[in-house]
């Protein structure tokens, strides 16, 4: 029997407890949606205000040089590289996850010109699948997207597979692939391996180099706490960089952008992934969140995440049994990212009722209540309080109220 007192004791002994003060978590809110949008670091407003007032306001265009604006993509990329086990010179911050995926997927297909198949999981995040479909249609060279269930990935890879494209932690269930094993399976058939780290970077240990991964992309506004719409990142392994060909060739990816030559010459290395001018205000906010992530030992983050996701699932089973909630995330901690998901036919109104009471998670169609677990600011006692409110919502039946059934633009 798990008690709140036991969880409070875990908080008292938690080495990560002081990190909560680094974030603004509104009073009266239990925030379980950091896997969709991380909360604001307390240092972010000051840093963004400094960029606006001093670097932009006073420095004007001089700040591209004097304040190092042009170096931001590589500088922040080098910091993210430490979180994902990649050499600093192989990671760059730019654009959105979708745009970066278009770049690296195009590069992968160009690097395997005799192959036509992109293998992915049927339950992958839809934008990844849409990008693959769109790129294949635009190229019009017979490429096709082959979708299978997660457990069928290795068997689906063959000699016609150009690239295997997977999200490391599934957005819908929190299920986590064995990165090393899947990458090895791709390489055994001569295919490249591309990982989407949107739900991994800053949440679970990632070592792209040890796994032998070829390409990766990731998000800046989830566990890296970079703010809504924060720039994303991309990675190209060192062995591919000398010959990489990106499908978007912008002026800042040119070898000499300020020479203003009429024809494109790619810059060396990851700099060729530049397209247009970096969004300086957004990058300033992102760097604050990335710096916090880099300060925190990932082993400690993962240990607390495993403990909290396990306790949360156990608490829901203990307190909410008989109300139709079905665990949709893997039971085994080693197969689970930093989220816990439950299926329920009335998931949407239940989640809306929870949010109205200050427990913020999210809904994923068709029937998933998704709870993100972010150890840097989430307390163990918060888990008890959240489940107590979930139990009250289920027992009272308040989720049946019409106001909770109205579908909003963002779920």
Image (tube, rainbow, N blue to C red):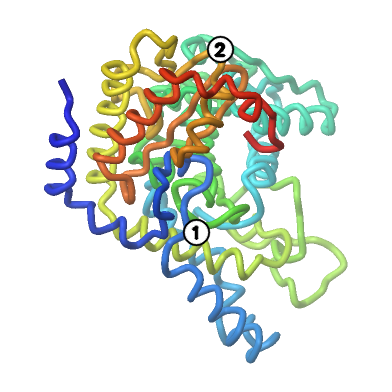
- Up the image or down, 155 lies above or below 190; here it is above
Tell me where residue 206 appears, x and y as whole percent: 37, 40
Q: Residue at x 28, y 55 (%)?
A: 296
Q: Secondary structure at mark 1?
A: helix
Of 180 and 123, nearer the camera is 123
**Quadrant showing the N terminus:** top left
Of 310 and 231, nearer the camera is 310
Q: Residue at x 54, y 46 (%)?
A: 219
Of 305 and 193, nearer the camera is 305
On the rendered structure, is 112 left or right of 378? right
- Up the image or down, 133 lies above or below 102; here it is above
**Quadrant showing the C terminus:** top right
Q: What residue occupies the far bottom of the structure in this picture?
A: 58
Tell me where residue 329 appears, x and y as whole percent: 41, 20
Tell me where residue 370 appears, x and y as whole percent: 48, 28
On the rendered structure, is 213 left or right of 231? left
Q: Which mark is residue 345?
A: 2
Q: Which mark is residue 77?
A: 1
């Amino acid at each position: 029997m798990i008690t709140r007192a036991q969880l409070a004791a875990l908080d008292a002994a938690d080495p990560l407890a002081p990190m909560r003060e680094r974030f603004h978590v509104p009073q009266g809110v239990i925030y379980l949606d950091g896997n969709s949008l991380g909360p604001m670091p307390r240092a972010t407003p000051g840093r963004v205000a400094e960029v606006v007032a001093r670097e932009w306001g006073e420095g004007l265009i001089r700040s591209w040089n004097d304040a190092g604006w042009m170096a931001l993509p590589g500088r922040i990329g080098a910091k993210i590289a430490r979180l994902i086990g990649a050499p600093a010179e192989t990671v760059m911050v730019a654009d959105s996850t979708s745009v970066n995926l278009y770049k690296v997927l195009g590069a992968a297909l160009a690097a395997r010109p005799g192959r036509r198949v992109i293998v992915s999981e049927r339950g992958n995040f839809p934008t990844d699948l849409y990008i693959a479909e769109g790129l294949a249609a635009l190229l019009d060279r017979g490429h096709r997207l082959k979708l299978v269930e997660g457990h069928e990935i290795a068997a689906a890879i063959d000699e016609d597979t150009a690239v295997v494209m997977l999200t490391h932690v599934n957005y819908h269930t929190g299920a986590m692939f064995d990165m090393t094993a899947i990458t090895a399976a791709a390489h055994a058939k001569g295919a490249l391996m591309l990982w989407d780290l949107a739900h991994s970077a800053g949440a679970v240990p990632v070592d792209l180099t040890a796994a032998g991964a070829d390409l990766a992309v990731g998000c800046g506004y989830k566990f890296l706490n970079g703010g809504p719409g924060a720039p994303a990142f991309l990675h190209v392994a060192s062995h591919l960089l000398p010959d990489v060909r990106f499908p978007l060739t912008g002026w800042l990816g040119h070898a000499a952008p300020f020479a203003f030559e009429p024809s494109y010459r790619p810059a060396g290395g990851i700099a060729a992934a530049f397209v247009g001018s970096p969004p300086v205000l957004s990058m300033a906010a992102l760097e604050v969140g990335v710096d916090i992530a880099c300060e925190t030992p990932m082993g400690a983050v993962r240990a607390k995440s495993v403990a909290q996701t396990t306790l949360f699932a156990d608490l829901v089973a203990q307190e909410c049994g008989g109300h139709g909630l079905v665990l949709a995330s893997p039971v085994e901690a080693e197969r689970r990212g930093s989220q816990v998901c439950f299926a329920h036919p009335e998931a949407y109104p239940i989640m809306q009722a929870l949010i109205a009471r200050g427990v913020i998670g999210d809904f994923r169609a068709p029937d998933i209540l998704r709870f993100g677990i972010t150890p840097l600011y989430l307390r163990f006692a918060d888990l008890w309080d959240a489940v107590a409110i979930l139990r009250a919502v289920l027992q009272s039946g308040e989720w049946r109220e019409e106001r909770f059934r109205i579908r909003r633009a963002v779920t």
